[in-house]
Amino acid sequence: MITNNLITQNLNTILEENLKLAKEINPQEVNVLIHEIKAANRIFVMAAGRSALALKMAAMRFMHLGYTVYVVGEVVTPAILEGDLLLVASGSGTTSTVVSAAEKAKKQKATVIAITADAESKLAEIANHLVLINAATKTDFGTAVSIQYAGSLFEQFTLFLLESVFMTLWQESGLTKEDLWPKHANLE
Amino acid sequence: MITNNLITQNLNTILEENLKLAKEINPQEVNVLIHEIKAANRIFVMAAGRSALALKMAAMRFMHLGYTVYVVGEVVTPAILEGDLLLVASGSGTTSTVVSAAEKAKKQKATVIAITADAESKLAEIANHLVLINAATKTDFGTAVSIQYAGSLFEQFTLFLLESVFMTLWQESGLTKEDLWPKHANLE
Amino acid sequence: MITNNLITQNLNTILEENLKLAKEINPQEVNVLIHEIKAANRIFVMAAGRSALALKMAAMRFMHLGYTVYVVGEVVTPAILEGDLLLVASGSGTTSTVVSAAEKAKKQKATVIAITADAESKLAEIANHLVLINAATKTDFGTAVSIQYAGSLFEQFTLFLLESVFMTLWQESGLTKEDLWPKHANLE
Amino acid sequence: MITNNLITQNLNTILEENLKLAKEINPQEVNVLIHEIKAANRIFVMAAGRSALALKMAAMRFMHLGYTVYVVGEVVTPAILEGDLLLVASGSGTTSTVVSAAEKAKKQKATVIAITADAESKLAEIANHLVLINAATKTDFGTAVSIQYAGSLFEQFTLFLLESVFMTLWQESGLTKEDLWPKHANLE
């Protein structure tokens, strides 16, 4: 049987690693993201693996706020056009499907914002704007930044960051919880 | 090694079973479906298992034609409202998640159309309109209607039927292939 | 109001186009596919758009027969290894994500089988085996082979072909409908 | 333009709400979850909405550790059987599809563990074991526990909790990052 201490300790480690990243974030970069979300005709999100799941959690909340949001790869997602925003996340900035989507979006004159841990990556080069997260990337096997597995810290913090983006958009909107509730899916 | 004849024979059997169903369809019911698709503010589709995949194939095409379409259960699907259409498919008409969604949609005063093989089912009772397919249902282990496995024939014909609905809507629209092409997802 | 004749006529057109393709299929190619499905440790399926949905319909049936099947891109899909089969479908044989996956699978020494309409495509070159379908591809705007929209006929026939593959595997297995039923998802 | 302070403040609020929950967790309940994950033949996960996305993030990691994991509702998910574990998450403990799945799993004699914020809920009654999270639930419009929107805190903390479960399982396994890497999906 595992000691209860180990579980508590791991929970603390994970939260403290995220707290440390929160102190290193550049709020100005997040501000630009918020500005572009509000300015966009429609918001498209795309990532691979667990980063995609974090983006989907955010996408659902943006929909609750009244934005038109699409997840790239889902059945009813239309073509991206000029005036739309593509929000991508890739710790390494090298995920090939994500880099390829960013390139295609740029060709359509859509705005691309990348959440990434590598400001020198291919993805960072393509994107119009970056939100840098100082987390270890998936194939970085060191423990300097995080003792967690692979890209876990990047993926967790991507979620947290977008939760704070949602919270900020919500506060600005002046809408109440009761105002948003009717947008929630009601057939499940 | 399987005889080549067996493969050819099975392919023919499957297509002939679908041809037989095509002769038994009531075009008036399909006409109502087409009318409601055109009249709806937004189209929601829902089913379980392979029927859900057939509906998703149709949903993608309806999106290409310019309709606003949502798959129930996907991340960015909003609440259904009065003026929307819920299109469901269930061979038996008893799939609990589908029946439950149909009931909830009716409470919102959305229109519900059910593609089903059982006109006496719970789902048939709830729906505003039916499109009846005379196929064996998933738990009907007889071979009178189909020698295929479980609901296979129902699922195949649901796809075919909706392909002909799309084709009819497309012909009516007067749009060319080139007109529709720009709607296709362009980031994959 | 649309004439009922138009609906009936479109349904017949679609089924006849599929019947025509059935006559042109090379059963020997399908035989190889069946052989490789039975020989594989695990089966991975991948495609884009509506072809992906057709493959998923087949994947579910292969699972019912007792095969270990994964859809590339789903959350719990593991790495492909030597001894596994990657089954892909692309009308044009040029879909970039599919071509890229086929290349990666080949590097892992997995077997790749491609269902395609173009025997000269990049995908056809990479694959160990082909199943050729003589259908118009998505960007082929002619009407010589099909008057349907874009890749519709290819996508429909991919489904049909795999339904006959399933039916053949099932007949060979000697299992009854009742034997397969307990494999069906039982939590929905 | 939003003040940068607001973004920083929201990020801190979110992390502090999660830290507070971490102090209130009962490690013994998490210990039981870890024990059951290790004891199970196969692990099935299920939830609705954003809780489902949090569970999927965990499911992917459990797969990387070598467990056989399925997401209920995905195409290749087989029937649950005795000896399997169903892990569900519902803040309110009343989500109808989740309650229904838990009941069906119990009938199959599978073990059910529920992550929930309500120990008195229908789901809590059905489950073999609970992991209680002291977070506001989706329809609890007060601000005593969280000033975030709806079930956001519950969903975030479900992810965190399962990240610490993964980290603990990983530490116990003695496997290195390099050992786990080959399990990662390699076709994207």
Image: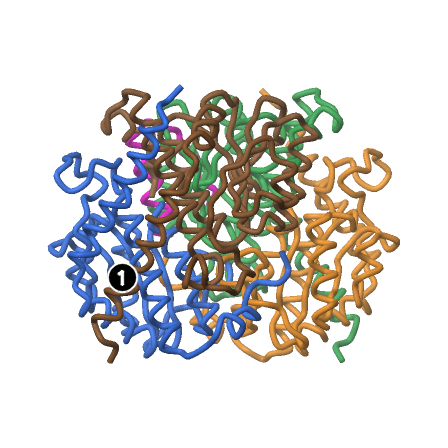
Chain colours: A orange, B blue, C brown, D green
Q: In which quarter of the image is the C terminus of chain A?
A: bottom left
Left or right for A119, reference A154: right
Task: Name the residue rendered at 60%, 60% in the picture.
Answer: A58
State the residue position of label 1: B102
Q: Which of C50 and D138 lies nearest the eye of the viewer? A: C50
Residue C74 location, quadrant: top right
Q: Residues within 10 Å of mark 1 (few under 14, many from 20)?
A: many
Camera-nearest residue between D3 and A86:
A86
Q: Where is residue B9 in the image (x, y as percent from the top left)?
A: 29, 34
Which span of residues is magenta-colored? D95-116
| Residue A106 located left or right of residue D146 | right
In percent of width and height, residue C168 lies at: 33, 29
C21 on left or right of C92? left
Q: Report x, y in % for residue A6.
A: 67, 29
Looking at this view, is D103 or C116 the one in front?
C116
Out of A114 and A3, give the one closest to the viewer: A114
Magenta-colored stretch includes residue D71 = no
Q: Residue at the location (70% across, 22% down)?
A: D175
Image-quadrant location for residue B144: top left
The answer, for residue C22, to whether it is visible in the render is yes
Q: Which residue is drawn at 33% across and 43% down?
A: C188
